[in-house]
């Protein structure tokens, strides 16, 4: 079994904890489903949030989904002028037999503009 990395992002409509839970939960669920993963396949997840998000930790949404035995960490994204606002990004380390080229990176909604080359 190989260690792989999966990227993803979602743009929130507003900075509210419930909305963040919903949107980050949808992102994590999509990553798991599109890569045919279970929570047992997760090694760790890094979350970043743009500086305009203050309502909650993105990792809290993972815990609410039942991802409880996986190390999670949150960090702030760089504050770059003109960057897309209200974005949560993930970098998940997983165990998978899939070749690197077959890993499905997930960019939901408007966040698809961040990586048009790999967004689905």
Image (cartoon, grey):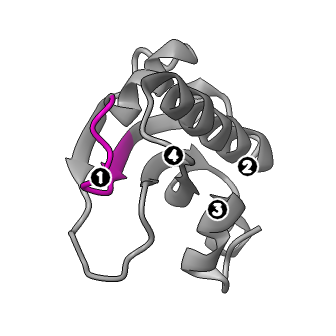
Q: Gap in Å between the C-alphas at discs 2 and 1?
A: 30 Å
Q: Gap in Å between the C-alphas at discs 3 and 4?
A: 18 Å
Cβ–Cβ below 8 Å for labels 2 and 4?
A: yes
Q: Gap in Å between the C-alphas at discs 3 and 2?
A: 14 Å
Q: In the rendered image, which residue does mark 3 sit on?
A: 107
| Relative vertical location of residue 84 with respect to residue 22 in this rendering, above or below | below
Answer whether residue 48 is magenta in the image: yes
Answer whether residue 25 is magenta in the image: no
Please give left or right for residue 109 compared with residue 44 in the image.
Answer: right
Viewer-nearest of labels 2 and 1? 1
Q: Earlier in the sequence, mark 2 or mark 1?
A: 2
Q: Earlier in the sequence, mark 2 or mark 4?
A: 2
Most foreground residue, 46 or 107: 107
Q: Which segment did they paint magenta?
A: 45-55
Q: Earlier in the sequence, mark 3 or mark 4?
A: 4
**Disc 4, SS:** strand
Cβ–Cβ below 8 Å for labels 1 and 3?
A: no
Q: Gap in Å between the C-alphas at discs 1 and 4?
A: 29 Å
**Disc 2, SS:** loop
In the drawing, what numbered circle is on residue 35?
Answer: 2
| Relative vertical location of residue 24 with respect to residue 93 in this rendering, above or below | above
Cβ–Cβ below 8 Å for labels 3 and 2?
A: no
């Amino acid at each position: 079994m190989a260690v792989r990395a999966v990227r993803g992002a979602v743009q929130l409509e507003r900075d509210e904890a419930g909305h963040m839970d919903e949107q980050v939960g949808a992102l994590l669920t999509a990553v798991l489903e599109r890569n045919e993963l279970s929570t047992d396949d997760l090694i760790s997840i890094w979350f970043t949030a743009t500086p305009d998000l203050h309502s909650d930790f993105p990792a809290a949404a993972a815990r609410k989904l039942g991802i409880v035995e996986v190390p999670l960490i949150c960090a702030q994204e760089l504050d770059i002028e003109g960057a897309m606002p209200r974005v949560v990004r993930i970098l998940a380390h997983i165990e998978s037999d899939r070749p690197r080229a077959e890993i499905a990176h997930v960019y939901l909604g408007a966040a698809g503009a961040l990586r048009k080359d790999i967004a689905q």
